[in-house]
Image (cartoon, rainbow, N blue to C red):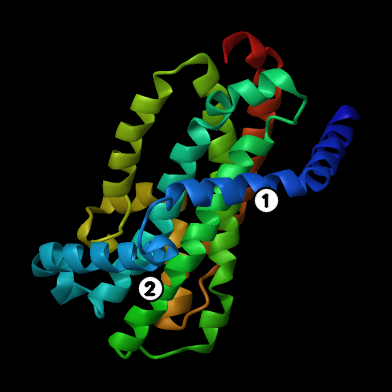
Amino acid sequence: MSNRPSQLSRSWQHFVKYQPLIRELVSRDLKVKYRRSFLGYVWSILNPLLMMALQTVIFSFMFRSNIPNYPLYLICGNTLFTFFNESANMGLTSVIYNAPLIKKVYIPKFIFPISRVASSFVTMSFSLAAVLLVMLFTRSPLHWTILLFWVPLVFELLFCCGIALTLAALTVYFRDMQHLFSVLTLGWMYATPIFYPLEQLPGFAQKLMKFNPMYHYINMFRNLVMYGNIPGPNTWIACVVSGVGMLAIGLLIFRKLQRNFILYV
């Protein structure tokens, strides 16, 4: 028990110390992502808008009658889930892709998955402009609760850091994790009410949805941005527990497995 606070303190000290490196890694990821792209960062806004338009055409016939302002409903869910999907997949390969650097110099290895999540968070921040554009285009009312839009994003950021740390550590030992997780995220997307209403699911599935962290982040974001509601205590508890809990689990797994990374990268 006495070692745990010191380990957490040491991790925080490393995080603060290596912030310039984290910023450099984030900058590198963004430059690589939009390298030789004519529109560059504009794609962070265009991509969610185009995806929303396409999915609205496809799914509106099935769900639109049940969901007011379906385009806004859709882009809110897509924006948050895309952040999760991108950060998890980028974090998954972060350690093995930086193997040459890890072998040459000492760097706290958790920096690599964290920097990948941070670069995905920056991309998602640009995408929020697309959400605002849809709100203006559909003449959605602007509630004061929109000022709290960042709260579910912070909880999701913690959750994604925990997921990225876990996947990055496991992938060093099990390279098949890359293929398994791509299937898992596809199922996770369809199991989350992104383009359909929760009420459309049978009763037992609605109860199971309480154990889906992505549902709670998206639900909180929609309540604050779309409906002008402050979510109830159950949603807050679910967001805090899943975000902080997953981060703690990710740090624990990463610290235990990183000792032998050098033998497998």
Q: Mark 1: give few (<14), some (14-19) or many (20+) Cα within 10 Å.
A: some
In the displayed structure, 55 sits above or below 23; it is below
Q: Is residue 251 above or below residue 262?
A: below
Q: Residue at x 71, y 20 (%)?
A: 104
Say which residue appears at 39% left-offset and 53% top-offset.
82
**22 relative position to 239: left or right:** right
Looking at the picture, does residue 23 appear above or below residue 79?
Answer: above
SS label for mark 1: helix
Where is residue 58? Give x, y as percent.
11, 62
Q: Nearer the viewer, mark 2 or mark 1?
A: 1
Q: As displayed, is residue 216 above or below residue 140?
A: above
Rendered image: mark on residue 213 = none
Q: Which residue is nearer to you in this view: 119 or 243?
A: 119
244 sits to left or right of 55: right
Does the rendering let one see residue 242?
A: no
Determine which residue is flagged by label 2.
130
Q: Is the C-beta separation of discs 2 and 1 under 8 Å?
A: no
- Where is residue 46, by image quadrant? bottom left
Question: What crowding class fits label 2: few (fewer than 14 Cα within 10 Å), some (14-19), or many (20 or more)?
Answer: many
Q: Position of residue 240 (x, y in %)?
A: 61, 55
**Secondary structure beneath label 2:** helix
Please, what is the three-letter code of the amino acid marked with disc 2?
Answer: Ala
Identify the residue under disc 1.
Answer: 23
Q: Nearer the viewer, residue 96 or 88?
A: 96
Mark 2 and mark 1 lie on one chain; the one further toward the N terminus is: 1
